[in-house]
Amino acid sequence: MPADAEELDLTRVGGSTVDDGPFLLGGAPRGTSFSPLWDMDVVVGQGITDPVVLGTSAVVLYLGSTRFDSDGLTKFDTNEIRFRLEAPCLLVVRQANGVYVVAGS
């Protein structure tokens, strides 16, 4: 969930108060092409209740034709533009032991 990802990004350790000390993950884990969380890519998804770890050799993702749309006309008075990126996809699990759902507490 996005809120959980934000909480993880902002978690600090070793300080005397909650707002003191270095960040647990350091830097901006989703601001670069890699994450300091065990050198894994971190992707945040809406509606996922428990974290899922996927081994890149255990699963294959097939993407169909991607469509990008923008809507700048209906929100022009507030200087807002909405974007949408959609693509049909299929995730094929080749090794079941390469997918792990982290149980929530």
Image: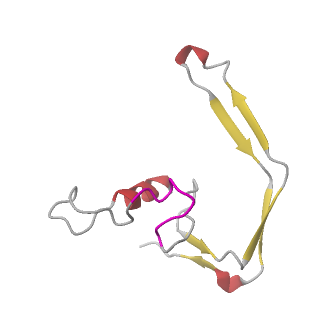
In the image, 94: left or right of 20? right
Query: Where is residue 67, by image quadrant?
Result: top right
Q: Work out whether 63 lies above or below 102.
A: above
How is this picture coloured? Answer: secondary structure
Q: Work out whether 2 lies above or below 78.
A: below
In the image, 87: left or right of 11? right
Q: Work out whether 74 lies above or below 64.
A: above
Does the magenta segment cover residue 29?
yes
Residue pictured at 57% horizontal, 53% vertical: 46
Q: Position of residue 19 (x, y in %)?
A: 22, 55
Q: Nearest the camera: 85 or 47?
A: 85
Residue pictured at 28% horizontal, 63% vertical: 22
Q: Main secondary structure of the magenta part?
A: loop
Q: Position of residue 29 (x, y in %)?
A: 47, 59
Q: Position of residue 20 (x, y in %)?
A: 20, 58
Q: In the current view of this chain or complex, which residue is farthest to the top?
A: 77
Q: Nearest the camera: 57 or 46?
A: 57
Q: Work out whether 105 lies above or below 70.
A: below
Query: Where is residue 79, by image quadrant?
Result: top right
Residue pictured at 52% horizontal, 75% vertical: 102
Q: In the current view of this chain or complex, which residue is farthest to the right?
A: 65
Does the magenta segment cover residue 2?
no
Q: Nearest the camera: 53 or 32?
A: 32
Residue pictured at 34% horizontal, 66% vertical: 24
In the image, 101: left or right of 14? right
Q: Nearest the camera: 25 or 58?
A: 25
Magenta stretch: give its range: 27-37
Q: Position of residue 23 (x, y in %)?
A: 32, 62
Q: How many labels sit on residues? A: 0
Which quadrant, please, contains the C terminus? bottom left
